[in-house]
Image: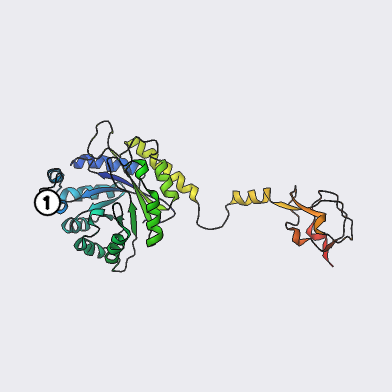
Amino acid sequence: MIGTDKTFIICELAQTHEGSVDLAKILVKTAALAKADAVKVQVFTAAELAAPSYKHYKLFKSLEWPEESWKELIDFSHKQGIKIFADVFGNDSLAMLVRNKIDGLKIHGTDMRNMRLLKDLARIDIPLLLSIGGGTIEETKTALSVLQGNERINPIILMHGFQSYPTLVEHSHLNKMRYFKDQIGLPVGFADHIDGEHHLNFGLCAAAIGMGAVVIEKHITVSRILKMEDYESALAPDAFSEFVAGIRELDAAKGQYSEEMIPTEVFYRKDTRKHVVADRPIKAGQTIKESDVVLRRAGTLETASDIADVIGKKTDKDYAVNDVILAGNLHKI
């Protein structure tokens, strides 16, 4: 599902639906029409996230959905031809999501040391995104020691990025993503949280892809003007569609991970490669010395291409300056 040849684009809904299943469906359909690979939602109960004394507890409580609402949204996403992932914050929500065939799960940095949740996640072989935002190498390795306890077919992706409503570009710290990739040896992704109107909305993600990100997560909102929940880092629908199209162009530019040349590169090589030509007049029967020849581009490709191939050989024809040296007219002494 998540590979290295094509960037996996996740459209992050977060809480921009403000508790409305109908609005969530509109955003899912928008993401599907934009040809994103998946949408992602945040699934929790207030009790899984916080104690009642926490400042946002009442907000969390107001955003709780019953299981039938989550099933409705998951089924709707699948009918739209798009996968649906979820941030999961507790064991009860996890069990509910698995029952309703969620396609992938993300472990928030706040649950990096939540061993009870990690152990349950280790038993589920679907794609996992492990957030490293606000996390250390040692915390990440400890979490992975649990998550990788069973054989897995689906990948675990280390997701870099954090939300500062919005995160400043200079705080994006893309080198941390690359560092974790090199230190741990797992694929990485980037969850972009810069201002939804910043001119680097596309460029920052392009840089992350160039630094190895195979997953890109980008927020969406129905309208930035309305300033709905979680709008700070979000793109409006048209901008999100343009964002996906741009990433797909980058994917086409990446090509294959090999030295194999594409046909246009082969033509370029043939058209620009230098060949052996005479740098002074050469007579038939003469033994060619290094000072007799030079490499230059030539109008024919039927020539010797390396000076070492002609040095010390005799020619059976005369050559004027800039005549190409034909390999078929050379003979060993």
Q: Is residue 167 visible?
A: yes
Crowding around mark 1 (Cα neighbors within 10 Å: few <14, some 14 to 19, many 20+) is few
Q: Residue at image x 39%, y 35%?
A: 199
Residue 86 falls left or right of residue 185:
left
Q: Residue at image x 39%, y 61%?
A: 183
Residue under pointer 1: 51
Give x and y (percent) for residue 196: 33, 37
Residue 90 falls left or right of residue 39:
left
On the rendered image, what quadrant is the C terminus found in? Answer: bottom right
Check disc 1 and report its element: helix, strand or loop.
loop
Give x and y (percent) for residue 255: 50, 52
On the rendered image, what quadrant is the N terminus found in? Answer: bottom left
Give x and y (percent) for residue 238: 35, 35
Nearest the viewer among 200 and 76 is 200
Residue type at mark 1 is Ala
Residue ranking furthest to the left: 52
Nearest the viewer among 215 and 144 is 144
